[in-house]
């Protein structure tokens, strides 16, 4: 055996020994218990708070990644070259004033073309330059594209962890996707095949990574011809996403295909001007023409049904840029058209999206215990039983707390009373306000025994109220207390979400609740306080 192979064998033996030490050495905490569990990992996980567990979950590498399909074809596969190209496109668009008229508006969505970057990149940059000016606003980008190869009975969603491009992996917002699939399985379906070998969605992603970084995406391919389904999907997308200010929609579409330069401009101007005028029936008739219209007519139509949920007097469609391949690549004999549009509304009409529910120290077991207490207290109140409920074992529930209990019957409010200041142990507060909501809310007659099975319950555990200025109020996060002299009114954080109020409406209705003029929040003599709440209903116990 040569000296080389002797050394190679020695390295192999050392590696084997190192591996056995790494998995079996109990002194470094790596010993495995029977069944294969790592005892150190199990004990440390049990000690973590929910917040720490969420942080660790977010730090875990994504495992289910969809790989780039057209890198090196429609755009550069070299990361440095790709980023430099996009940055140059964006800088040129910004210098030309792309989106400058939208600075004081809320940009809901953009239309962006999807050809190879040498052809459509200069136009796409206008859409993404406008979005970049609002980049800090967004946490989620919904990308709505088409399929050039297949049709589908429903709207296709990419239900994976991430989408990889040469610039890295964009995280997919799985929470939103799972909600969409659960809420509307008749509209949306997971279908990876619809995204394979398809460029219309993917070419938008590197632009998102550069112009609107630190966002998650919701990848959607609209390839169904069921117009009624698309209308329902648009209405749902508004409720689930469009109504929230941290969501941006990117609609992928080119314009006319393979006409002479001047003829193409005529067809393309018709498509864009009809969208600007928001004449959707006429636009559909024109845009649906195979070569004269828009290849992305289906995703654009779906978005239109979402955007129409905003009042007509607040919607604005702005043409950012039009060119065709004759302008960008030089050959004008047969061109493809590219348009950049912005869809906007005045600021303040969309609310902040509620974050994922954080129940703080209240574990499922504690939430179930509190809910059982509230139900027992309501039952006792309806029967006229004044005996107090037994004291719980948990020290968390014995700590001082302020809470509201809300009762509903068939979806309608049946009683709601609470304590704003923590003066009682939380469990005793829950019992007290649950009884009061059942029989002492003067807006309603007392709850009867016959109604008990028809009631639904919601518990709101409150933080200490703190002074706040009107401009700092965040809808969905803050509950409000407005007071002046002997008048005072309170609304919980979930109320403006249920009624789709913006911030000013929330303030006005809290004034009304206090018995004060609805514009009293504008008066310096009015005291405004905010609190936050951990809110859970019967569906939030697991």
Image: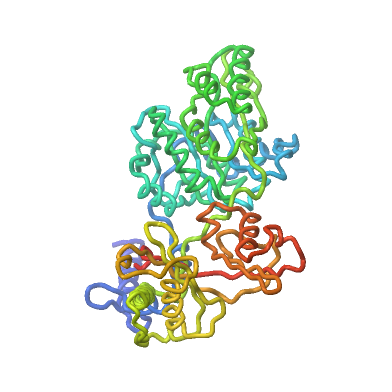
Residue 373, position in %: x, y? 36, 77
Res 508 → quadrant: bottom right
Q: Nearer the viewer, residue 344 or 436?
A: 436
Residue 222, position in %: x, y? 43, 34
Q: Residue at x 49, y 31 (%)?
A: 301
Res 371 → quadrant: bottom left
In the picture, measured across the screen, residue 539 lies left or right of residue 268, that is left
Position of the C terminus by quadrant: bottom left
Is 100 located above or below residue 149 in the figure? below
Residue 470, position in %: x, y? 69, 62
Q: Nearer the viewer, residue 46 or 247?
A: 247
**Circle count:** 0
Is 33 located above or below residue 6 in the figure? below
Quick one: which residue is furthest to the left in this view? Answer: 35
In the picture, measured across the screen, residue 182 lies left or right of residue 142, that is left
Q: Residue at x 35, y 64 (%)?
A: 455
Q: Nearer the viewer, residue 455 or 180?
A: 455
**Is residue 468 visible to us here?**
yes
Is 325 located above or below residue 147 in the figure? above
**Is residue 56 visible to us here?**
no
């Amino acid at each position: 055996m040569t000296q080389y192979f002797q050394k190679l064998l020695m390295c192999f033996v050392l590696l084997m020994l190192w591996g056995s030490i790494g998995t079996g050495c109990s002194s470094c905490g790596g010993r495995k218990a029977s069944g294969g569990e790592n005892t150190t990992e199990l004990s440390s996980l049990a000690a973590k708070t929910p917040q720490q567990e969420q942080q660790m979950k977010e730090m875990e590498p994504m495992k289910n990644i969809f790989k780039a399909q057209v890198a090196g074809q429609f755009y550069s596969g070299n990361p440095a070259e790709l980023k430099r190209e996009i940055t140059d496109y964006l800088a040129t668009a910004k210098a030309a004033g792309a989106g400058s008229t939208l600075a004081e508006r809320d940009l809901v969505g953009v239309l962006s073309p999807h050809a190879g970057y040498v052809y459509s990149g200069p136009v796409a940059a206008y859409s993404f330059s406008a979005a970049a000016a609002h980049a800090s606003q967004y946490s989620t980008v919904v990308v709505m594209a088409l399929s050039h190869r297949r049709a589908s009975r429903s709207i296709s969603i990419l239900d994976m962890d991430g989408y990889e491009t040469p610039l890295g992996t964009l995280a997919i917002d799985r929470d939103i996707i799972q909600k969409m699939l659960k809420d509307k399985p008749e509209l949306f379906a997971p279908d990876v095949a619809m995204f394979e070998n398809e460029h219309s969605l993917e070419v938008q992603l590197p632009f998102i990574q550069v112009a609107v970084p630190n966002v998650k995406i919701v990848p959607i391919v609209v390839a169904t011809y069921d117009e009624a389904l698309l209308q329902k999907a648009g209405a749902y997308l508004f409720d689930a996403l469009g109504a929230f200010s941290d969501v941006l929609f990117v609609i992928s579409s080119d314009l006319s295909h393979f006409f002479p330069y001047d003829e193409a401009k005529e067809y393309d101007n018709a498509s864009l001007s009809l969208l600007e005028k928001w004449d959707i029936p006429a636009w559909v008739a024109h845009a649906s023409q195979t070569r004269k219209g828009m290849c992305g007519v289906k995703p654009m139509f779906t978005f239109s049904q979402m955007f129409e949920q905003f009042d007509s007097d607040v919607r604005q469609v702005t043409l950012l840029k039009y060119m065709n391949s004759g302008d960008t690549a030089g050959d004008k004999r047969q061109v493809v058209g590219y348009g950049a549009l912005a869809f906007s509304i005045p600021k303040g009409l969309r609310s902040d999206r509620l974050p994922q529910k954080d129940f703080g120290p209240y574990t499922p077991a504690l939430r179930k215990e509190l809910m059982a207490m509230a139900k027992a207290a309501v039952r006792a109140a309806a029967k006229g039983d004044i005996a107090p409920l037994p004291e719980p074992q948990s020290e968390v529930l014995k700590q001082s707390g302020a809470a509201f209990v809300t009762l509903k019957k068939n979806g309608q409010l049946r009683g709601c009373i609470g304590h704003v200041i923590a003066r009682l142990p939380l469990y005793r507060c829950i019992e007290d306000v649950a009884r009061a909501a059942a029989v002492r809310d003067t807006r309603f007659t007392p709850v009867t025994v016959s109604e008990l099975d028809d009631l639904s319950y919601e518990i709101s555990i409150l933080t200490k109220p703190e002074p706040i200025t009107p401009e700092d109020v965040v809808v969905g996060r803050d509950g409000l207390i407005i007071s002046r002299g002997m008048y005072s009114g309170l609304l919980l954080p979930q109320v403006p979400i249920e009624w789709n109020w913006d911030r000013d409406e929330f303030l006005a209705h809290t004034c009304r609740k206090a018995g004060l003029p609805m514009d009293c929040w504008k008066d310096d003599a009015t005291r405004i306080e905010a609190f936050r709440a951990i809110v859970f209903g019967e569906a939030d116990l697991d």
